[in-house]
C-alpha cells in the first residue's frame, strides 16, 4: 500500500528556502543542504516551484525555457545532485510545470512576435472590437484587461495572468506535442512527480464578453480539457506508474474533478481545488476584508470529501502554498494559542481523505509577513491590486490592511531556520524581508522538542503510513451544524478514526453522536486529552481518536 495515499508532499519555494551563496536568493543547493531536515519530517515528495529560466516577473511562473535552470537557482549539475541526494533518502522530486502560458521572453513568443506564423499560432491572438476596445472584457487574474495589443499585427494576445505571461494555444497540436516533450525531458532526469500549474485553464471556449463576471466561465474547465489531459497522460507520465501528478484547478467544479482525478480516468492522480480557501473572500473578490465563514468552510471541505470519495477520485488536501496567506494567521491564532491552533489546523487537514501537502514553514507555525509599507512587497499581484484599490479611492492604510491579510507575499518570506541573523536563511540581504519573529519561531528550536509544531507534523506524517484508516478510510461529517467544532469520522477494515477540533479560542462543549469511550487518543494538542462522548473542548483543542475492532 505504498502509493500517494500514504504519502505526504512538502512544497518548497526555492527562492525563500535557503541561500547558500549569499546573494539573498535561495537556490537548489539550499534544498540539497536541507534534505536531512525534510527526511526527519518524514515526507515522501518534494514539490519544487519553478526554477527554470525566467525573467521572474511572477517568480518563475513566467517560464522562458522549460529545459534550462535559471542561473539564479543554480545549474543542471546542481539539479542532478539534488535529485541523487533526494533519491538516497527516499524522497521524490515533483516539478512544477507551467503550461497554460509562457513568458513573453520564451523563444516561441519571440519568434511569434517576429512574425513566424508557426510560432504565432502557439499563442492566442484576436482582433480588437470595432470600437477599439480589446477583443473581450475578460480580466487578468493579476488585475486589468486580459488582452495586450501588439501594433505590428494590429491584434491582441491573451494573458490570463501578467502581460508577460502569454497564454498558449492548446488547440494547436504542435503546442501539445512540445509540452509532452518537456514532460518527457524531465521524466528522463528521474523526477517522480509533476504539479501542473492552472492546468484547467488550458482549453479556451468561446471568446465572448462576460456580462456576468470576469470571463472565467469561458475558459475554466473548458471544452477540450479532459481530452488534452488524457492525451498528455498517455504520451508521458501515464507510461510510468511510479509518477504522481497533481493539477492546480482554478475555480473548478467538483464534477470536473471527478474526471481529472478519478481512479479510472487516466488524467491526473489528484487535484488542488481552492473553494475552501475563499471563505474569507466576497464571492470571487479576494481584495476585501471579511471574516472567515466557518460554516462555509466546513460545508465545502466536507462536500468535497464526500463527493470525491463517492466517485473514487482523489484530493490533494492543504491549507497553505506560495499563493495563500499563512494558515495560523488566517484561521488560527498568532498570539496566546499559536501552538495549539497550528496543531489543530494540522490535524484537520492531515486526517482527511487525500494526500496532504505541507508548505515550507507551515510545519513550524510560520505566520504572515506583517509588512507595513509597499516597498516591502514583491508580488506582482499584490502590487497591481494595491494600485487598483487606491485608484478606486481607498486610503493607503485600508489597502495595506487588505494586503496584510491576503497578499501572496505572506507565504513568501524566507524560511526561518534558526535564531541567527535573517533566520539563518542568508548571509546577504534577503530578496524579501524575513519575519522578525524568527528569533522565536524557527526550525532549530523545534526539531527534537516533543511538544513542538514540527514534532506534531512529523507524527501526522507517520500516522498516515501506520494506519490504513487515515490513508484509505471513508469519510463522514459529524455534527456539521455545530458553531465551533469541525469533526469527522473515517472508517476502514474495522478501524474507526475520529478527528474533532474546536476551531476557536473559546472553550466549548461537543457531544459526539457516537460513543467515544474506550477510544485511544492517537494525537492531541493538549497533553492530558481524554476520549469521552461529551467533550469539554479547550481553546483550539483537537483530538484524533482511534477505535480498533
Ligand atoms: C498559479 C501559481 C501562481 C502563479 C499563477 C500563474 O496559480 O500557483 O503562483 O502566479 O499560477 O502561473
Image (cartoon, rainbow, N blue to C red):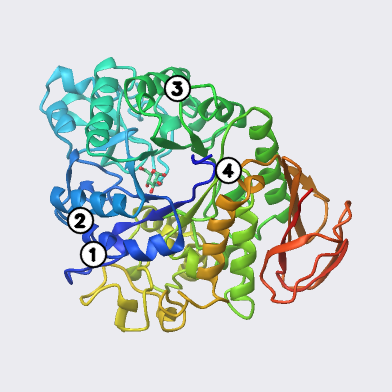
* Observer-nearest of 114 and 211: 114
**Classed neighbour count for the residue bearing mark 4: other residues with Cα under 10 Å, few (<14), some (14–19), many (≥20):** many
Alpha carbon separation for disc pair 3 and 2 = 32 Å
**Classed neighbour count for the residue bearing mark 1: other residues with Cα under 10 Å, few (<14), some (14–19), many (≥20):** many
- Residue 240 placed where, x, y %? 36, 28
Work out which residue is located at the far front of the displayed protein and give it.
549
Q: Is residue 266 above or below residue 103?
A: above
The residue where tag 1 is placed is 25
The residue where tag 4 is placed is 354
Quadrant containing the N terminus is top right
Q: Is mark 3 within 8 Å of ligand 1?
A: no
- Residue 411 placed where, x, y %? 43, 62
Alpha carbon separation for disc pair 4 and 1 = 33 Å
Q: Is residue 136 above or below residue 372?
A: above
Sequence order check, earlier mark of 1 and 3: 1
The residue where tag 2 is placed is 73
* Observer-nearest of 245 and 132: 245
Q: Quadrant of residue 474?
A: top right
Q: Residue at 58% of width from left, 63% of height from top? A: 330
Sequence order check, earlier mark of 2 and 4: 2
- Residue 44 placed where, x, y %? 43, 50
The residue where tag 3 is placed is 225
Sequence order check, earlier mark of 4 and 1: 1
Sequence order check, earlier mark of 4 and 3: 3
Q: Quadrant of residue 111?
A: top left
C-beta proximity under 8 Å, tags 2 and 1: yes
- Residue 272 placed where, x, y %? 51, 41
Amino acid at each position: 500500500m505504498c502509493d500517494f495515499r500514504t504519502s505526504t508532499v512538502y512544497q518548497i519555494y526555492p527562492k525563500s528556502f535557503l541561500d547558500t551563496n549569499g546573494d539573498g536568493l535561495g537556490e537548489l543547493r539550499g534544498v540539497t543542504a536541507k534534505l536531512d531536515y525534510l527526511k526527519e519530517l518524514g515526507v515522501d515528495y518534494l514539490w519544487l516551484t519553478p526554477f527554470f529560466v525566467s525573467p521572474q516577473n511572477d517568480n518563475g511562473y513566467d517560464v522562458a525555457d522549460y529545459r534550462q535552470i535559471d542561473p539564479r537557482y543554480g545549474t543542471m549539475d546542481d539539479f542532478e545532485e539534488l535529485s541523487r541526494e533526494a533519491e538516497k533518502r527516499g524522497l521524490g522530486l515533483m516539478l512544477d510545470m507551467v503550461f497554460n502560458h509562457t513568458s513573453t521572453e520564451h523563444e516561441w513568443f519571440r519568434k511569434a512576435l517576429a512574425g513566424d506564423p508557426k510560432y504565432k499560432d502557439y499563442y492566442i491572438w484576436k482582433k480588437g472590437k470595432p470600437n477599439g476596445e480589446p477583443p473581450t472584457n475578460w480580466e487578468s487574474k493579476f488585475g486589468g484587461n486580459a488582452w495586450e495589443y501588439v501594433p505590428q499585427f494590429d491584434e491582441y494576445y491573451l494573458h490570463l495572468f501578467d502581460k508577460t505571461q502569454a497564454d498558449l494555444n492548446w488547440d494547436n497540436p504542435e503546442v501539445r506535442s512540445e509540452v509532452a516533450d518537456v514532460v518527457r525531458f524531465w521524466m528522463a532526469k528521474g523526477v517522480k512527480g509533476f504539479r501542473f500549474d492552472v492546468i484547467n485553464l488550458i482549453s479556451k471556449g468561446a471568446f465572448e464578453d462576460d456580462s456576468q463576471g470576469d470571463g472565467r466561465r469561458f475558459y475554466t474547465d473548458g471544452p477540450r480539457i479532459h481530452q488534452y489531459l488524457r492525451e498528455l497522460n498517455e504520451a508521458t507520465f501515464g507510461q510510468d506508474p511510479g509518477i504522481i501528478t497533481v493539477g492546480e484547478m482554478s475555480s473548478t467544479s467538483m464534477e470536473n474533478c471527478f474526471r481529472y482525478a478519478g481512479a479510472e480516468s487516466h488524467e491526473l492522480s489528484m487535484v488542488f481545488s481552492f473553494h475552501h480557501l475563499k471563505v474569507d473572500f466576497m464571492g470571487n473578490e479576494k481584495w476585501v476584508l471579511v471574516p472567515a465563514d466557518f460554516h462555509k468552510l466546513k460545508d465545502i471541505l466536507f462536500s468535497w470529501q464526500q463527493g470525491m470519495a463517492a466517485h473514487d477520485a482523489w484530493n490533494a488536501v492543504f491549507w497553505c502554498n506560495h499563493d495563500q496567506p499563512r494558515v495560523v494567521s488566517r484561521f488560527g491564532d498568532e498570539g496566546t494559542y499559536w501552538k495549539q491552533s497550528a496543531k489543530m489546523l494540522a490535524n484537520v487537514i492531515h486526517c482527511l481523505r487525500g494526500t496532504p501537502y505541507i508548505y515550507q514553514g507551515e510545519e513550524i507555525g510560520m505566520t504572515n509577513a506583517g509588512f507595513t509599507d509597499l516597498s516591502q512587497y514583491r508580488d506582482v499581484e499584490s502590487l497591481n491590486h494595491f494600485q487598483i484599490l487606491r485608484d478606486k479611492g481607498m486610503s493607503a492604510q485600508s489597502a495595506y490592511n487588505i494586503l496584510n491579510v491576503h497578499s501572496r507575499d505572506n507565504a513568501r518570506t524566507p524560511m526561518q531556520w534558526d535564531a541567527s541573523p535573517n533566520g539563518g536563511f542568508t548571509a546577504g540581504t534577503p530578496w524579501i524581508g524575513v519575519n522578525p519573529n524568527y528569533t522565536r519561531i524557527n526550525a532549530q528550536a523545534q526539531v527534537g522538542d516533543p511538544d513542538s509544531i514540527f514534532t506534531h507534523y512529523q507524527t501526522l506524517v507517520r500516522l498516515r503510513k501506520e494506519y490504513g484508516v487515515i490513508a484509505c478510510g471513508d469519510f463522514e461529517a459529524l455534527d456539521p451544524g455545530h458553531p465551533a467544532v469541525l469533526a469527522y469520522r473515517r472508517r476502514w477494515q474495522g478501524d474507526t478514526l475520529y478527528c474533532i477540533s474546536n476551531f476557536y479560542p473559546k472553550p466549548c462543549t461537543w457531544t459526539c453522536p457516537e460513543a467515544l469511550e474506550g477510544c485511544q487518543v492517537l494525537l492531541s494538542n493538549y497533553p492530558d486529552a481524554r476520549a469521552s462522548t461529551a467533550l469539554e473542548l479547550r481553546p483550539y483543542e483537537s483530538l484524533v481518536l482511534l477505535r480498533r475492532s
